[in-house]
Image (cartoon, rainbow, N blue to C red):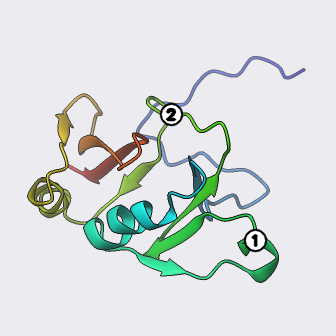
Amino acid sequence: MTGHHEPLPYDTTEATSPFGMGLHHVQLTIPPGSEQECRRFYVDVLGMSEVRKPPNLAARGGLWVRADRLEIHLGVEADFVPARRAHPGILVADVDALADRLAGHGVEVTWDENFPGYRRFHTFDNLGNRLEFMTPA
């Protein structure tokens, strides 16, 4: 059990651990057989690149995509239910250009100005998984 610690102010940069934590990838789930449909969204619409899964993991199905400093693993789940609330918060350099690109492909974006210090919008991938894209204000 840990002792009570006061929460840090949101704008602090002093949130460290002795472990050097960082994020390697985010995993979202997809239903079996939806890899090609997901390629159309993540590769064709978002402009990410597919990366080959290691052979020992490829047999599980799914799809891995990468762009810049972001990697998303789309893992197959037999009883797939889209993540409608849980979501990755993805930093982008030009949030307006991405919103325009998505809208140009018929993808709805919902702007939300309630996150201090950031401009952001939410959208859903082709299977209904929620995604948040943001840039510092």
Residue 80 horizontal/vertical position (percent): 59, 39
Residue that appears at 75% across and 71% down: 59
Farthest residue in the front direction?
Answer: 33
What residue appears at the point 35 percent right and 50 percent down from the top-left corner?
126
Check disc 1 and give the amino acid type.
Ala
Q: Which mark is residue 86?
A: 2
Taking the image as shown, residue 19 lies to the left or right of residue 118, namely right
Classify 10 Å Cα crowding around label 1: few (below 14), some (14-19), many (20 and above).
Answer: few
Left or right of residue 134, residue 95 in this image: left
- Identify the secondary structure beneath mark 2: loop
Q: Residue at x 38, y 45 (%)?
A: 131
Task: Determine whether 14 is above or below 82 in the image.
Answer: below
Kindly identify the residue that appears in the image at 18 percent across and 57 percent down. Answer: 102
Where is mark 1, residue-wise? 59
Residue 120 vs residue 1: left or right?
A: left
Left or right: 42 as drawn, with respect to 100? right
Q: Quadrant of the N terminus?
A: top right
Disc 2 marks a residue whose amino acid type is Ala
Identify the mark nearer the N-term, 1 or 2. Answer: 1
